[in-house]
Amino acid sequence: GENVEQHPSTLSVQEGDSAVIKCTYSDSASNYFPWYKQELGKRPQLIIDIRSNVGEKKDQRIAVTLNKTAKHFSLHITETQPEDSAVYFCAASAAGNTGTASKLTFGTGTRLQVTL
Amino acid sequence: KAGVTQTPRYLIKTRGQQVTLSCSPISGHRSVSWYQQTPGQGLQFLFEYFSETQRNKGNFPGRFSGRQFSNSRSEMNVSTLELGDSALYLCASSPDRVAKKDPEAFFGQGTRLTVV
């Protein structure tokens, strides 16, 4: 089955700096890669996603890049703010087979701390 | 538009008992997936239901089961509870290919199950 590795497990940056979280996946059938942000005691919230036919996607301060050949994808957060502090999870799914984001395989999470 | 609703939010059960958790997906979503979140194992896929049929299953023992009703609401059942079943159980609903271009999965707030 699919295996997703995520690094680093913890990341501390100063406000205004950039943060990068990296994930690798093993199953070449995976074609949908979402990123979730989970604040303490809250549900995971989708912040950005990318499909395998796209190399990069950006939404304001957040961007995701995908290297399908190397089977890795990354989350980039620029101009970090204290409210970006949370646990971030990457995930992979062969969504194209069913049309739904089913059977997501998650990375182990990155705890991002943005300090003032 | 109402989000994914899970009930109850908190449960305390005794070893050996059984428990049923409920999930109401976003209106129009036919795919419902269940995940177990623990500090040690992270987010792990349990199963997915689509149009009342189990479409995908994770690597959990048969004590974990589920079903989906004609209105897409889903229930998850865990029989013969063990201490290790203590976790946050999350469900996610996803639109299908016909309904939406991108296969996003939206999570409910989860049910916190404590087995004593």
Image (cartoon, rainbow, N blue to C red):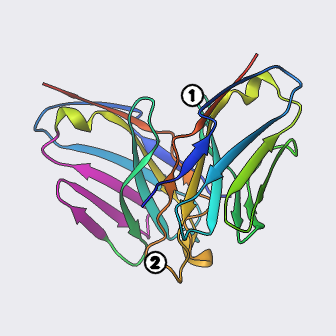
Q: Picture quarter containing residue B68?
A: bottom right
Q: Position of residue B110 (x, y in %)?
A: 57, 39
The count of marks equals 2
| Residue sitting at the far bottom | B98
Say which residue label 1 marks: B39
- Tell me which residue sits at (64%, 56%) in the image: B33
Q: Position of residue B107 (x, y in %)?
A: 51, 50
Examine the rendering and report whether any part of residue A71 can be seen. no
What amino acid does circle 2 point to? Lys
Secondary element at tag 1: loop
The answer to whether marks 2 and 1 sit on the same chain is yes
Position of B105 relative to A84 (above/below): below
What amino acid does circle 1 point to? Pro
Q: Which residues are magenta?
A: A56-80
| Residue sitting at the far top | B116
Spatial CA span between label 2 and label 1: 33 Å
Q: Earlier in the sequence, mark 2 or mark 1?
A: 1
- Tell me which residue sits at (55%, 48%) in the image: B5
**Towards the viewer: B39 or A13:** B39
In this rendering, position of residue A81 left or right of residue A65: left
Position of the N terminus of chain A by quadrant: bottom right
- Tell me which residue sits at (47%, 54%) in the image: B3
Which label lies toward us, 2 or 1?
Answer: 2
Examine the rendering and report whether any part of residue A38 can be seen. yes
Residue A72 falls inside the magenta stretch = yes
Name the mark on residue B100: 2
Residue B11 falls inside the magenta stretch = no
- Tell me which residue sits at (30%, 60%) in the image: A64
Position of B113 relative to B97 (above/below): above
Chain containing the residue with disc 1? B
Chain containing the residue with disc 2? B
